[in-house]
Amino acid sequence: MTTEENRTTLLREVKQLIVDALQLDDVQPDSIADDEPLFGTGLALDSIDALELAMAITRRYAVKMSQGEETRDAFRSVGHLVDYILLHAA
């Protein structure tokens, strides 16, 4: 699989993970845009959602999510989360 195919697959997986982990029953994973903001506008997640999502990502991808600037930046959108996972996956 190419890097782009890996990224595309991971985008789908992370969208599904967001819906499942946060129990967003009224959101379809395919309706989440890659560059849609996760907080504020867009999905309008809150800090509790961020913690739950960070734990789900850590469990699923063995990627440590700290409270640093890089992690905060990763939570801007699904695309940023995927890039973070690809960069930090063991």
Image (tube, rainbow, N blue to C red):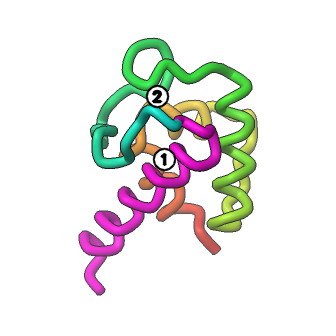
In the image: residue 64, left or right of residue 72 = right
Q: CA distance from mark 1 to mark 2?
A: 10 Å
Q: Nearer the viewer, residue 40 or 65?
A: 40
- Residue 89 in picture, x, y percent from top left: 59, 68
Examine the image and state in which quarter residue 67 appears: top right
Q: Earlier in the sequence, mark 1 or mark 2?
A: 2
Which residue occupies 53% across, 59% down?
A: 85
Labelled pair 1, 2 in contact (Cβ < 8 Å): yes
Specify the segment rendered in magenta. Answer: 1-24
Above/below status of 10 relative to 65 = below
In the image: residue 48, left or right of residue 11 = right
Q: Which residue is mark 1?
A: 81
- Residue 2 in picture, x, y percent from top left: 26, 81
Which residue occupies 73% across, 26% down?
A: 48
Residue 38's disc is 2
Name which residue type carries label 1.
Answer: Leu
Which residue occupies 43% across, 54% down?
A: 83
